[in-house]
Amino acid sequence: MAMNLPRVYAITDCRLTGLSHAEQVRRLAAGGVRLIQLREKTASPRAFYEQAREAVAVARELGVQVLINDRVDIALAVGADGVHLGQEDLPPEKARALLGPDRLIGFSTHSLEQALAADAWPVDYIAIGPIFPTQTKEHPDPVVGVEMVRAVRARIRKPLVAIGGITLETAPRVIAAGADAVAVIADLLRAPDITARARQYVETLAALP
């Protein structure tokens, strides 16, 4: 599937918000976000399946694309738009064989070498990070910095997502370095009003060149 990445890529986190994935999708969509990844590290597979099914139903109603973090099986079971895979997950070529040509596959990288390798694989976009220190992962990879975004952008063809500790204040700098989109968790979800914060992101990044 050809992918035109929106500049704001939200990722859900039930621990940060105390809200279901479906409710997070609803609030983020109300702020104009159109691409959302459901990320779940603590629930059982069955519980995540039930929550993802509900979230995808809300997303369909609101015209939002939803990707499932890590779990190709759950993405297939709930009819999600695709998956986001990490370095230790199912290899992209195996995921593509299961998902078919029309669903989206994103892939996490943490170095120029990993990004260059991923550029040749059957994925729709490549994520690079963490750009800044992040607190949403228990064991984060080493910070790669904004200059890594610039270095990766110069060498790959696929759309590029920057992730890791990005805020509304730093997002424009990351886009200027060559990222097609910024993936954001904490700076969106910790806001007192998630919808208002999402709208700030969408409007701020839409105004950039």
Image (tube, helix red, strand yellow):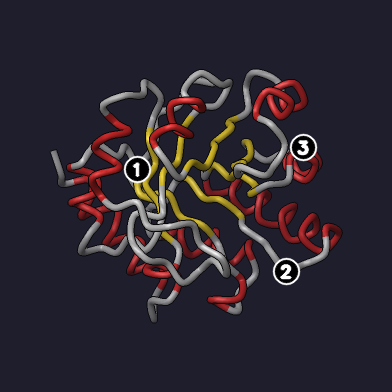
- In the rendered image, residue 143, in percent from the top left (x then y), is placed at 37, 57
User: Within 10 Å of the Cα at label 1, are there few (<14), some (14-19), or many (20+) other Cα atoms?
Assistant: many
Q: Earlier in the sequence, mark 2 or mark 3?
A: 2
Q: Name which quarter of the figure residue 198 lies in.
A: bottom left
The kind of residue on which mark 2 rests is Thr
Q: Compute the Cα span from label 2 to label 1.
A: 27 Å
Left or right of residue 199, residue 78 in this image: right
Judged from the image, the secondary structure of the residue bearing numbered disc 2 is loop
Q: Quadrant of residue 77?
A: top right
From the image, tell me which residue sits under label 2: 42
Q: Earlier in the sequence, mark 2 or mark 1?
A: 2
Camera-near label (1 vs 3) is: 1
Q: Residue at x 13, y 38 (%)?
A: 209
Kind of residue indicated by mark 1: Ala
In this view, the residue in front, 188 or 94, is 94
Q: Residue at x 50, y 68 (%)?
A: 136
